[in-house]
Image (cartoon, rainbow, N blue to C red):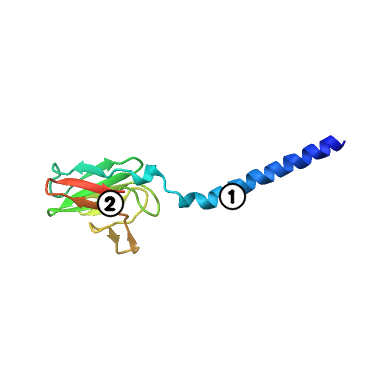
Amino acid sequence: MIEKRLLLRVTIKLCIAATAIGIVYIFIAGFFESSEFKDKPQYTFSVSSLKNNSHVYFKTDRRELLVIKSNDAYSVFWAHDPLYGCRLEFIDTIIKPVCIDIEYGLDGVSSKTNQTLDSPEYNITADYELVVFP
C-alpha cells in the first residue's frame, strides 16, 4: 500500500515538473532567435513580361503575391483578402475578392468598407526585378 502511494506521489510530482518546464519554455522561447528566420532569403521575381493593365500571381513559401501593372506603375499585394482570406482577382481597374462583394482600387483601399489590402515590403529594380522582403 505504501509503494502505491509513493508511486502516485512521484508520478504527480513528475507531471507537475514537466508542466512547469513546458510553461517556462513557452514564455522564454521568443527570446532566442532562430537561424531559420534570421537567414531567410528575400524573394525575387521578374516582372519584365507584365504589360499595362495586366497582372500576375507569384508564389512564395507559404503565401501568394498579386502584382498589377497599370499606367507603368506597379501594385503588389498579398493575394488573399486580409479579413476573409479568400483569393483576390484583378478585373479591369478593380481588385475583388471571390467570396465577398468588396471592391478595392489599385491603391489597395476599399472606400466603401474602409479596408486596406496587405502589401509586403518590396522594391522593383531597374532590371524589372521585384524583390520582396518577408
Near-viewer residue (31 or 58): 31
Q: In this figure, which residue is indicated by the disc labeled 2?
A: 77
**Residue 39 x/y as whole percent:** 33, 43
> Quadrant location of the N terminus?
top right
* Residue visible at 13% across and 43% down in the picture: 48
Near-viewer residue (24 or 56): 24
Near-viewer residue (43 or 22): 22
Relative to residue 50, is residue 107 depicted above or below?
Answer: below
Q: How many marks?
A: 2
> On residue 94, which mark appears?
none
> What secondary structure is marked by label 2?
strand
> What secondary structure is marked by label 1?
helix
Asked whether, in this view, residue 7 is left or right of residue 101, the answer is: right
The span from disc 1 to disc 2 (Cα, nearest Å) is 37 Å
Task: Return the residue found at the far right.
Answer: 1
**Residue 84 x/y as whole percent:** 40, 52
Asked whether, in this view, residue 94 is left or right of residue 82, the answer is: left
* Residue visible at 38% across and 42% down in the picture: 36
Asked whether, in this view, residue 18 is left or right of residue 105, the answer is: right
Q: Mark 1 Cα within 10 Å, few/some/many (few <14, many 20+)?
A: few
* Residue visible at 39% across and 49% down in the picture: 85
* Residue visible at 50% across and 49% down in the picture: 29
Residue mark closest to the camera, 1 vs 2? 1
Q: Amino acid at mark 1?
A: Ile
**Residue 125 x/y as whole percent:** 15, 49
Q: In this figure, which residue is indicated by the disc labeled 1?
A: 23
Indicate which disc, 1 or 2, sits on the residue closer to the N terminus.
1
Q: Amino acid at mark 2?
A: Phe
Relative to residue 115, is residue 41 depicted above or below?
Answer: above
**Residue 33 x/y as whole percent:** 42, 48
Relative to residue 28, is residue 57 depicted above or below?
Answer: above
